[in-house]
Amino acid sequence: MLTIQAKIRKLLGKLNSKKIRKDNLIPAVLYEKNKKSISVFLKNKDIINAKKKENFYKNTINLYIENTVRKVKIQYIQWHPFKEKIMHIEFKIIK
C-alpha cells in the first residue's frame, strides 16, 4: 500500500493554487459521502514516485494528514494541457 504525506490547505482559490504549484506542490481535495470536503496539498515528487508503481490508480493509498491516516483512492487527476505536470488531484475517502 502506498503512503503519502499531505497538509491541510487553509487558503483556497485559484491564486493560492497557483502559488502552491510554484512551490512544486499539488493542490488536492478529499471527498467523503455526506461530509464536507477536505482541501490539502501534496509534494509533487511523492506523487510522481508513487505513479511509477504498478496499479497506482487502482490501489488504496494511505494519506497522512496532521497525525491522522485516511485511506483514499484516486478519483480524478487533472494534467497540464501540454506539460507532464499534475495540476490537481481528487481523492475519494474509503471507509
Image: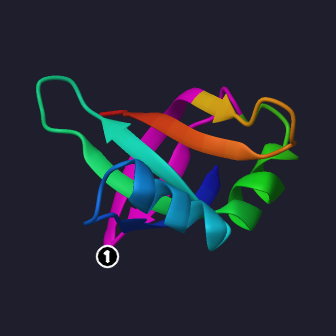
Residue 38 visible, this angle: yes
Query: What colouring method underlies this structural image?
Result: rainbow
Image coordinates of residue 40 in percent, x first then y, are 39, 57
Label 1 sits on residue: 67
Residue occupying the point 69% across, 29% down: 57
Q: Which residues are magenta?
A: 57-76
Three-letter residue code for mark 1: Asn
* Up-down relation of residue 8 to residue 71 (above or below): below
Residue 51 locus on image (x, y percent): 79, 45
Please state the horizontal and vertical placement of residue 73, each as a whole percent of the image. Answer: 51, 33
Q: Is residue 32 left or right of residue 81?
A: left
**Which of the pair 51/40 is nearer the observer?**
40
Q: Is residue 59 left or right of residue 69?
A: right
- Residue 73 colored in magenta in the image: yes
Between residue 12 and residue 42, name the one nearer to us. Answer: 12
Q: Secondary structure at mark 1?
A: loop
Magenta span contains residue 21: no
Residue drawn 79% across the image and 54% down it: 48
Q: Quadrant of residue 86?
A: top right
- Farthest residue to the front: give it: 15
**Residue 42 appears in the figure:** no
Instruction: Give coordinates of residue 36: x percent, y percent.
Output: 14, 38
